[in-house]
């Protein structure tokens, strides 16, 4: 967390503690130097699905379908990827365990029993794309990044912080993540 000042560090620490102590999220750690950070942490999602009794073959097919939905490129825009991933999150992944078997719905989020989901956060998640970016906090549900919280220095106005976040989205710096949130320490 070397890129932020002392006041910002205190705010980020308070926010992390709030998620962990008040909301009971798992803390995945500071991922600044962790390699291979992704919007879908397959290990976390695989573990969650396996604990729910989903067969290994079905998990692999589900992960492939989710990866294809989230992938950008070849003319696919971020909006389209978000729409496809939302559909899978909301309505489940329809997939067969094997040839000749019936389709099953694999739920990536347990909408009926929210407490059964695994909520987690990681700090300083370094993302290597066209440019390297490091959002302050990433929120994961069952290993799927559903939110990015970017804290701004108290010397940056709220309107300037919003402008910076919009610029980052236009430049696709956060294209690996589905949703992006901004927070201020109340400096404005």
Image (cartoon, grey):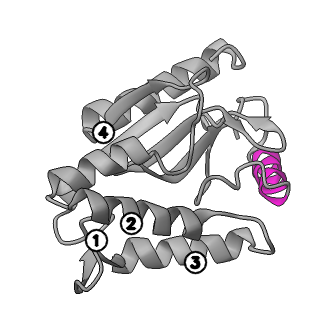
Q: Which residue is mark 2?
A: 62
Choose top left, top right, bottom left or bottom right for residue 24. top left
SS under mark 1: strand
Q: Which residue is mark 1?
A: 106
What's the residue at 27%, 30% (across, down)? Answer: 21
Specify the segment rendered in magenta.
Answer: 159-170
Residue 37 visible in image: yes
Q: Which residue is mark 4?
A: 25
Q: CA distance from mark 1 to mark 2?
A: 7 Å
SS under mark 3: helix
For residue 83, the mark is 3
- N-terminal of the pair, mark 2 or mark 4, is 4
What's the residue at 68%, 33% (across, down)? Answer: 134
Q: Determine whether 71 is above or below 22 in the image.
A: below
- Check disc 4: other Cα within 10 Å, few if <14, some if 14-19, many if 20+: some
What's the residue at 82%, 46% (across, down)? Answer: 160
Q: Between 154 and 56, which is closer to the camera in this rendering?
A: 56
SS under mark 4: loop
Q: Determine whether 157 is above or below 17 in the image.
A: below
The percent coordinates of residue 168 (x first, y second) are 80, 50
Q: Are marks 1 and 2 in contact (CB under 8 Å)?
A: yes
What's the residue at 82%, 53% (across, down)? Answer: 163
- N-terminal of the pair, mark 4 or mark 3, is 4
- Check disc 2: other Cα within 10 Å, few if <14, some if 14-19, many if 20+: many
Q: Determine whether 46 is above or below 84 in the image.
A: above
Farthest residue to the front: give it: 99
């Amino acid at each position: 967390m070397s890129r932020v000042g002392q006041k910002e560090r205190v705010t980020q620490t308070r926010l992390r503690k709030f998620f962990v102590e008040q909301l009971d999220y798992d803390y995945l750690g500071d991922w600044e130097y962790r390699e291979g950070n992704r919007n879908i942490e397959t290990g976390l999602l695989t573990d969650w699905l396996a604990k729910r009794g989903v067969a290994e073959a079905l998990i692999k097919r589900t992960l492939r379908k989710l990866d294809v939905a989230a992938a950008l490129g070849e003319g696919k825009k971020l909006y389209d990827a978000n729409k496809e991933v939302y559909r899978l999150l909301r309505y489940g992944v329809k997939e067969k365990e094997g040839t000749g078997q019936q389709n099953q719905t694999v739920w990536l989020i347990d909408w009926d029993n929210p407490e059964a989901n695994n909520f987690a956060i990681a700090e300083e998640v370094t993302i290597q794309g066209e440019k390297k970016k490091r959002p302050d906090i990433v929120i994961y549900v069952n290993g799927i990044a559903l939110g990015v919280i970017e804290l701004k220095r108290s010397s940056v106005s709220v309107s300037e912080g919003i402008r910076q976040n919009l610029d980052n989205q236009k430049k696709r710096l956060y294209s690996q993540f589905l949703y992006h949130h901004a927070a201020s320490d109340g400096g404005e």
